[in-house]
Image: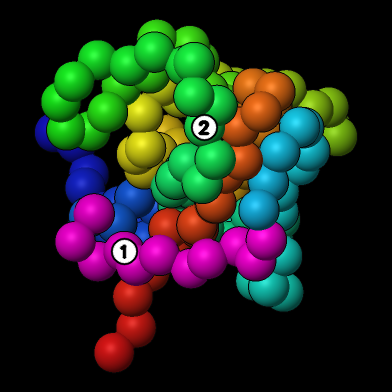
Amino acid sequence: MSLQYPLIDVLLHPPFGSLRREVIPGLFSGSGDLDRNTGALAPFNNVNAYGLRVTFFTVPAPFGYELGSPRVYYNRMVQLTVRYRDALGNDQDLELYDVHAEQAFIWREPGPLLIHYEICPGVECVFEWLIVKFP
């Protein structure tokens, strides 16, 4: 017999239909770190979001892609690394996403420390947090 905690499951991993996008201002290129500290309690005290959406603003003309929807580029456009901190203060990258198309990513473990990005030279991106929708 196992105990189930549906309310906790929804808080830690809400269904996609209950999420909305929140634009992170600016165009991004190169490399850097993203966080969303809203003053929330742990585990949401560093990145108070459940995922990230990546949209390409600028893509160099010679980059090849497969026809379809979404457009899938041959080159990795962005690499996202989801970093966490353990109870002793050690940082570890637990999730890695290679982005070849505009799409949303929901991390498996709630409450990352930060999201590190590496964007292919010549590419500019728009990032949007995936957060819980409130009425």
Q: Pinpoint residue 63: horizontal percent, then vertical percent.
A: 47, 16
Q: As shown in the figure, which amino acid type bears the numbered disc 2?
A: Val
User: Where residue 99 is drawn, which disc sits there?
Assistant: none
Q: As shown in the figure, which amino acid type bears the numbered disc 1?
A: Leu
Q: How many marks?
A: 2
Q: Pinpoint residue 65: horizontal percent, then vertical percent.
A: 33, 16
Residue 55 location, quadrant? top left
Residue, disc 1: 19
Q: Secondary structure at mark 2?
A: loop
Residue, disc 2: 59
Q: Nearer the viewer, residue 56 or 60?
A: 60
Q: Pinpoint residue 91: horizontal percent, then vertical percent.
A: 79, 28
User: In which quadrant will I find the C terminus?
Assistant: bottom left
Q: CA distance from mark 2 to mark 1?
A: 28 Å
User: In which quadrant will I find the N terminus?
Assistant: top left
Q: Is residue 25 magenta?
A: yes
Give me the residue at 23% from left, 33% from top: 70
Q: Is residue 64 magenta?
A: no
Question: Which is the main secondary structure of the residues drawn in magenta?
Answer: strand
Q: Nearer the viewer, residue 102 or 33?
A: 102
Q: Is residue 134 visible?
A: yes
The range drawn in magenta is 16-26
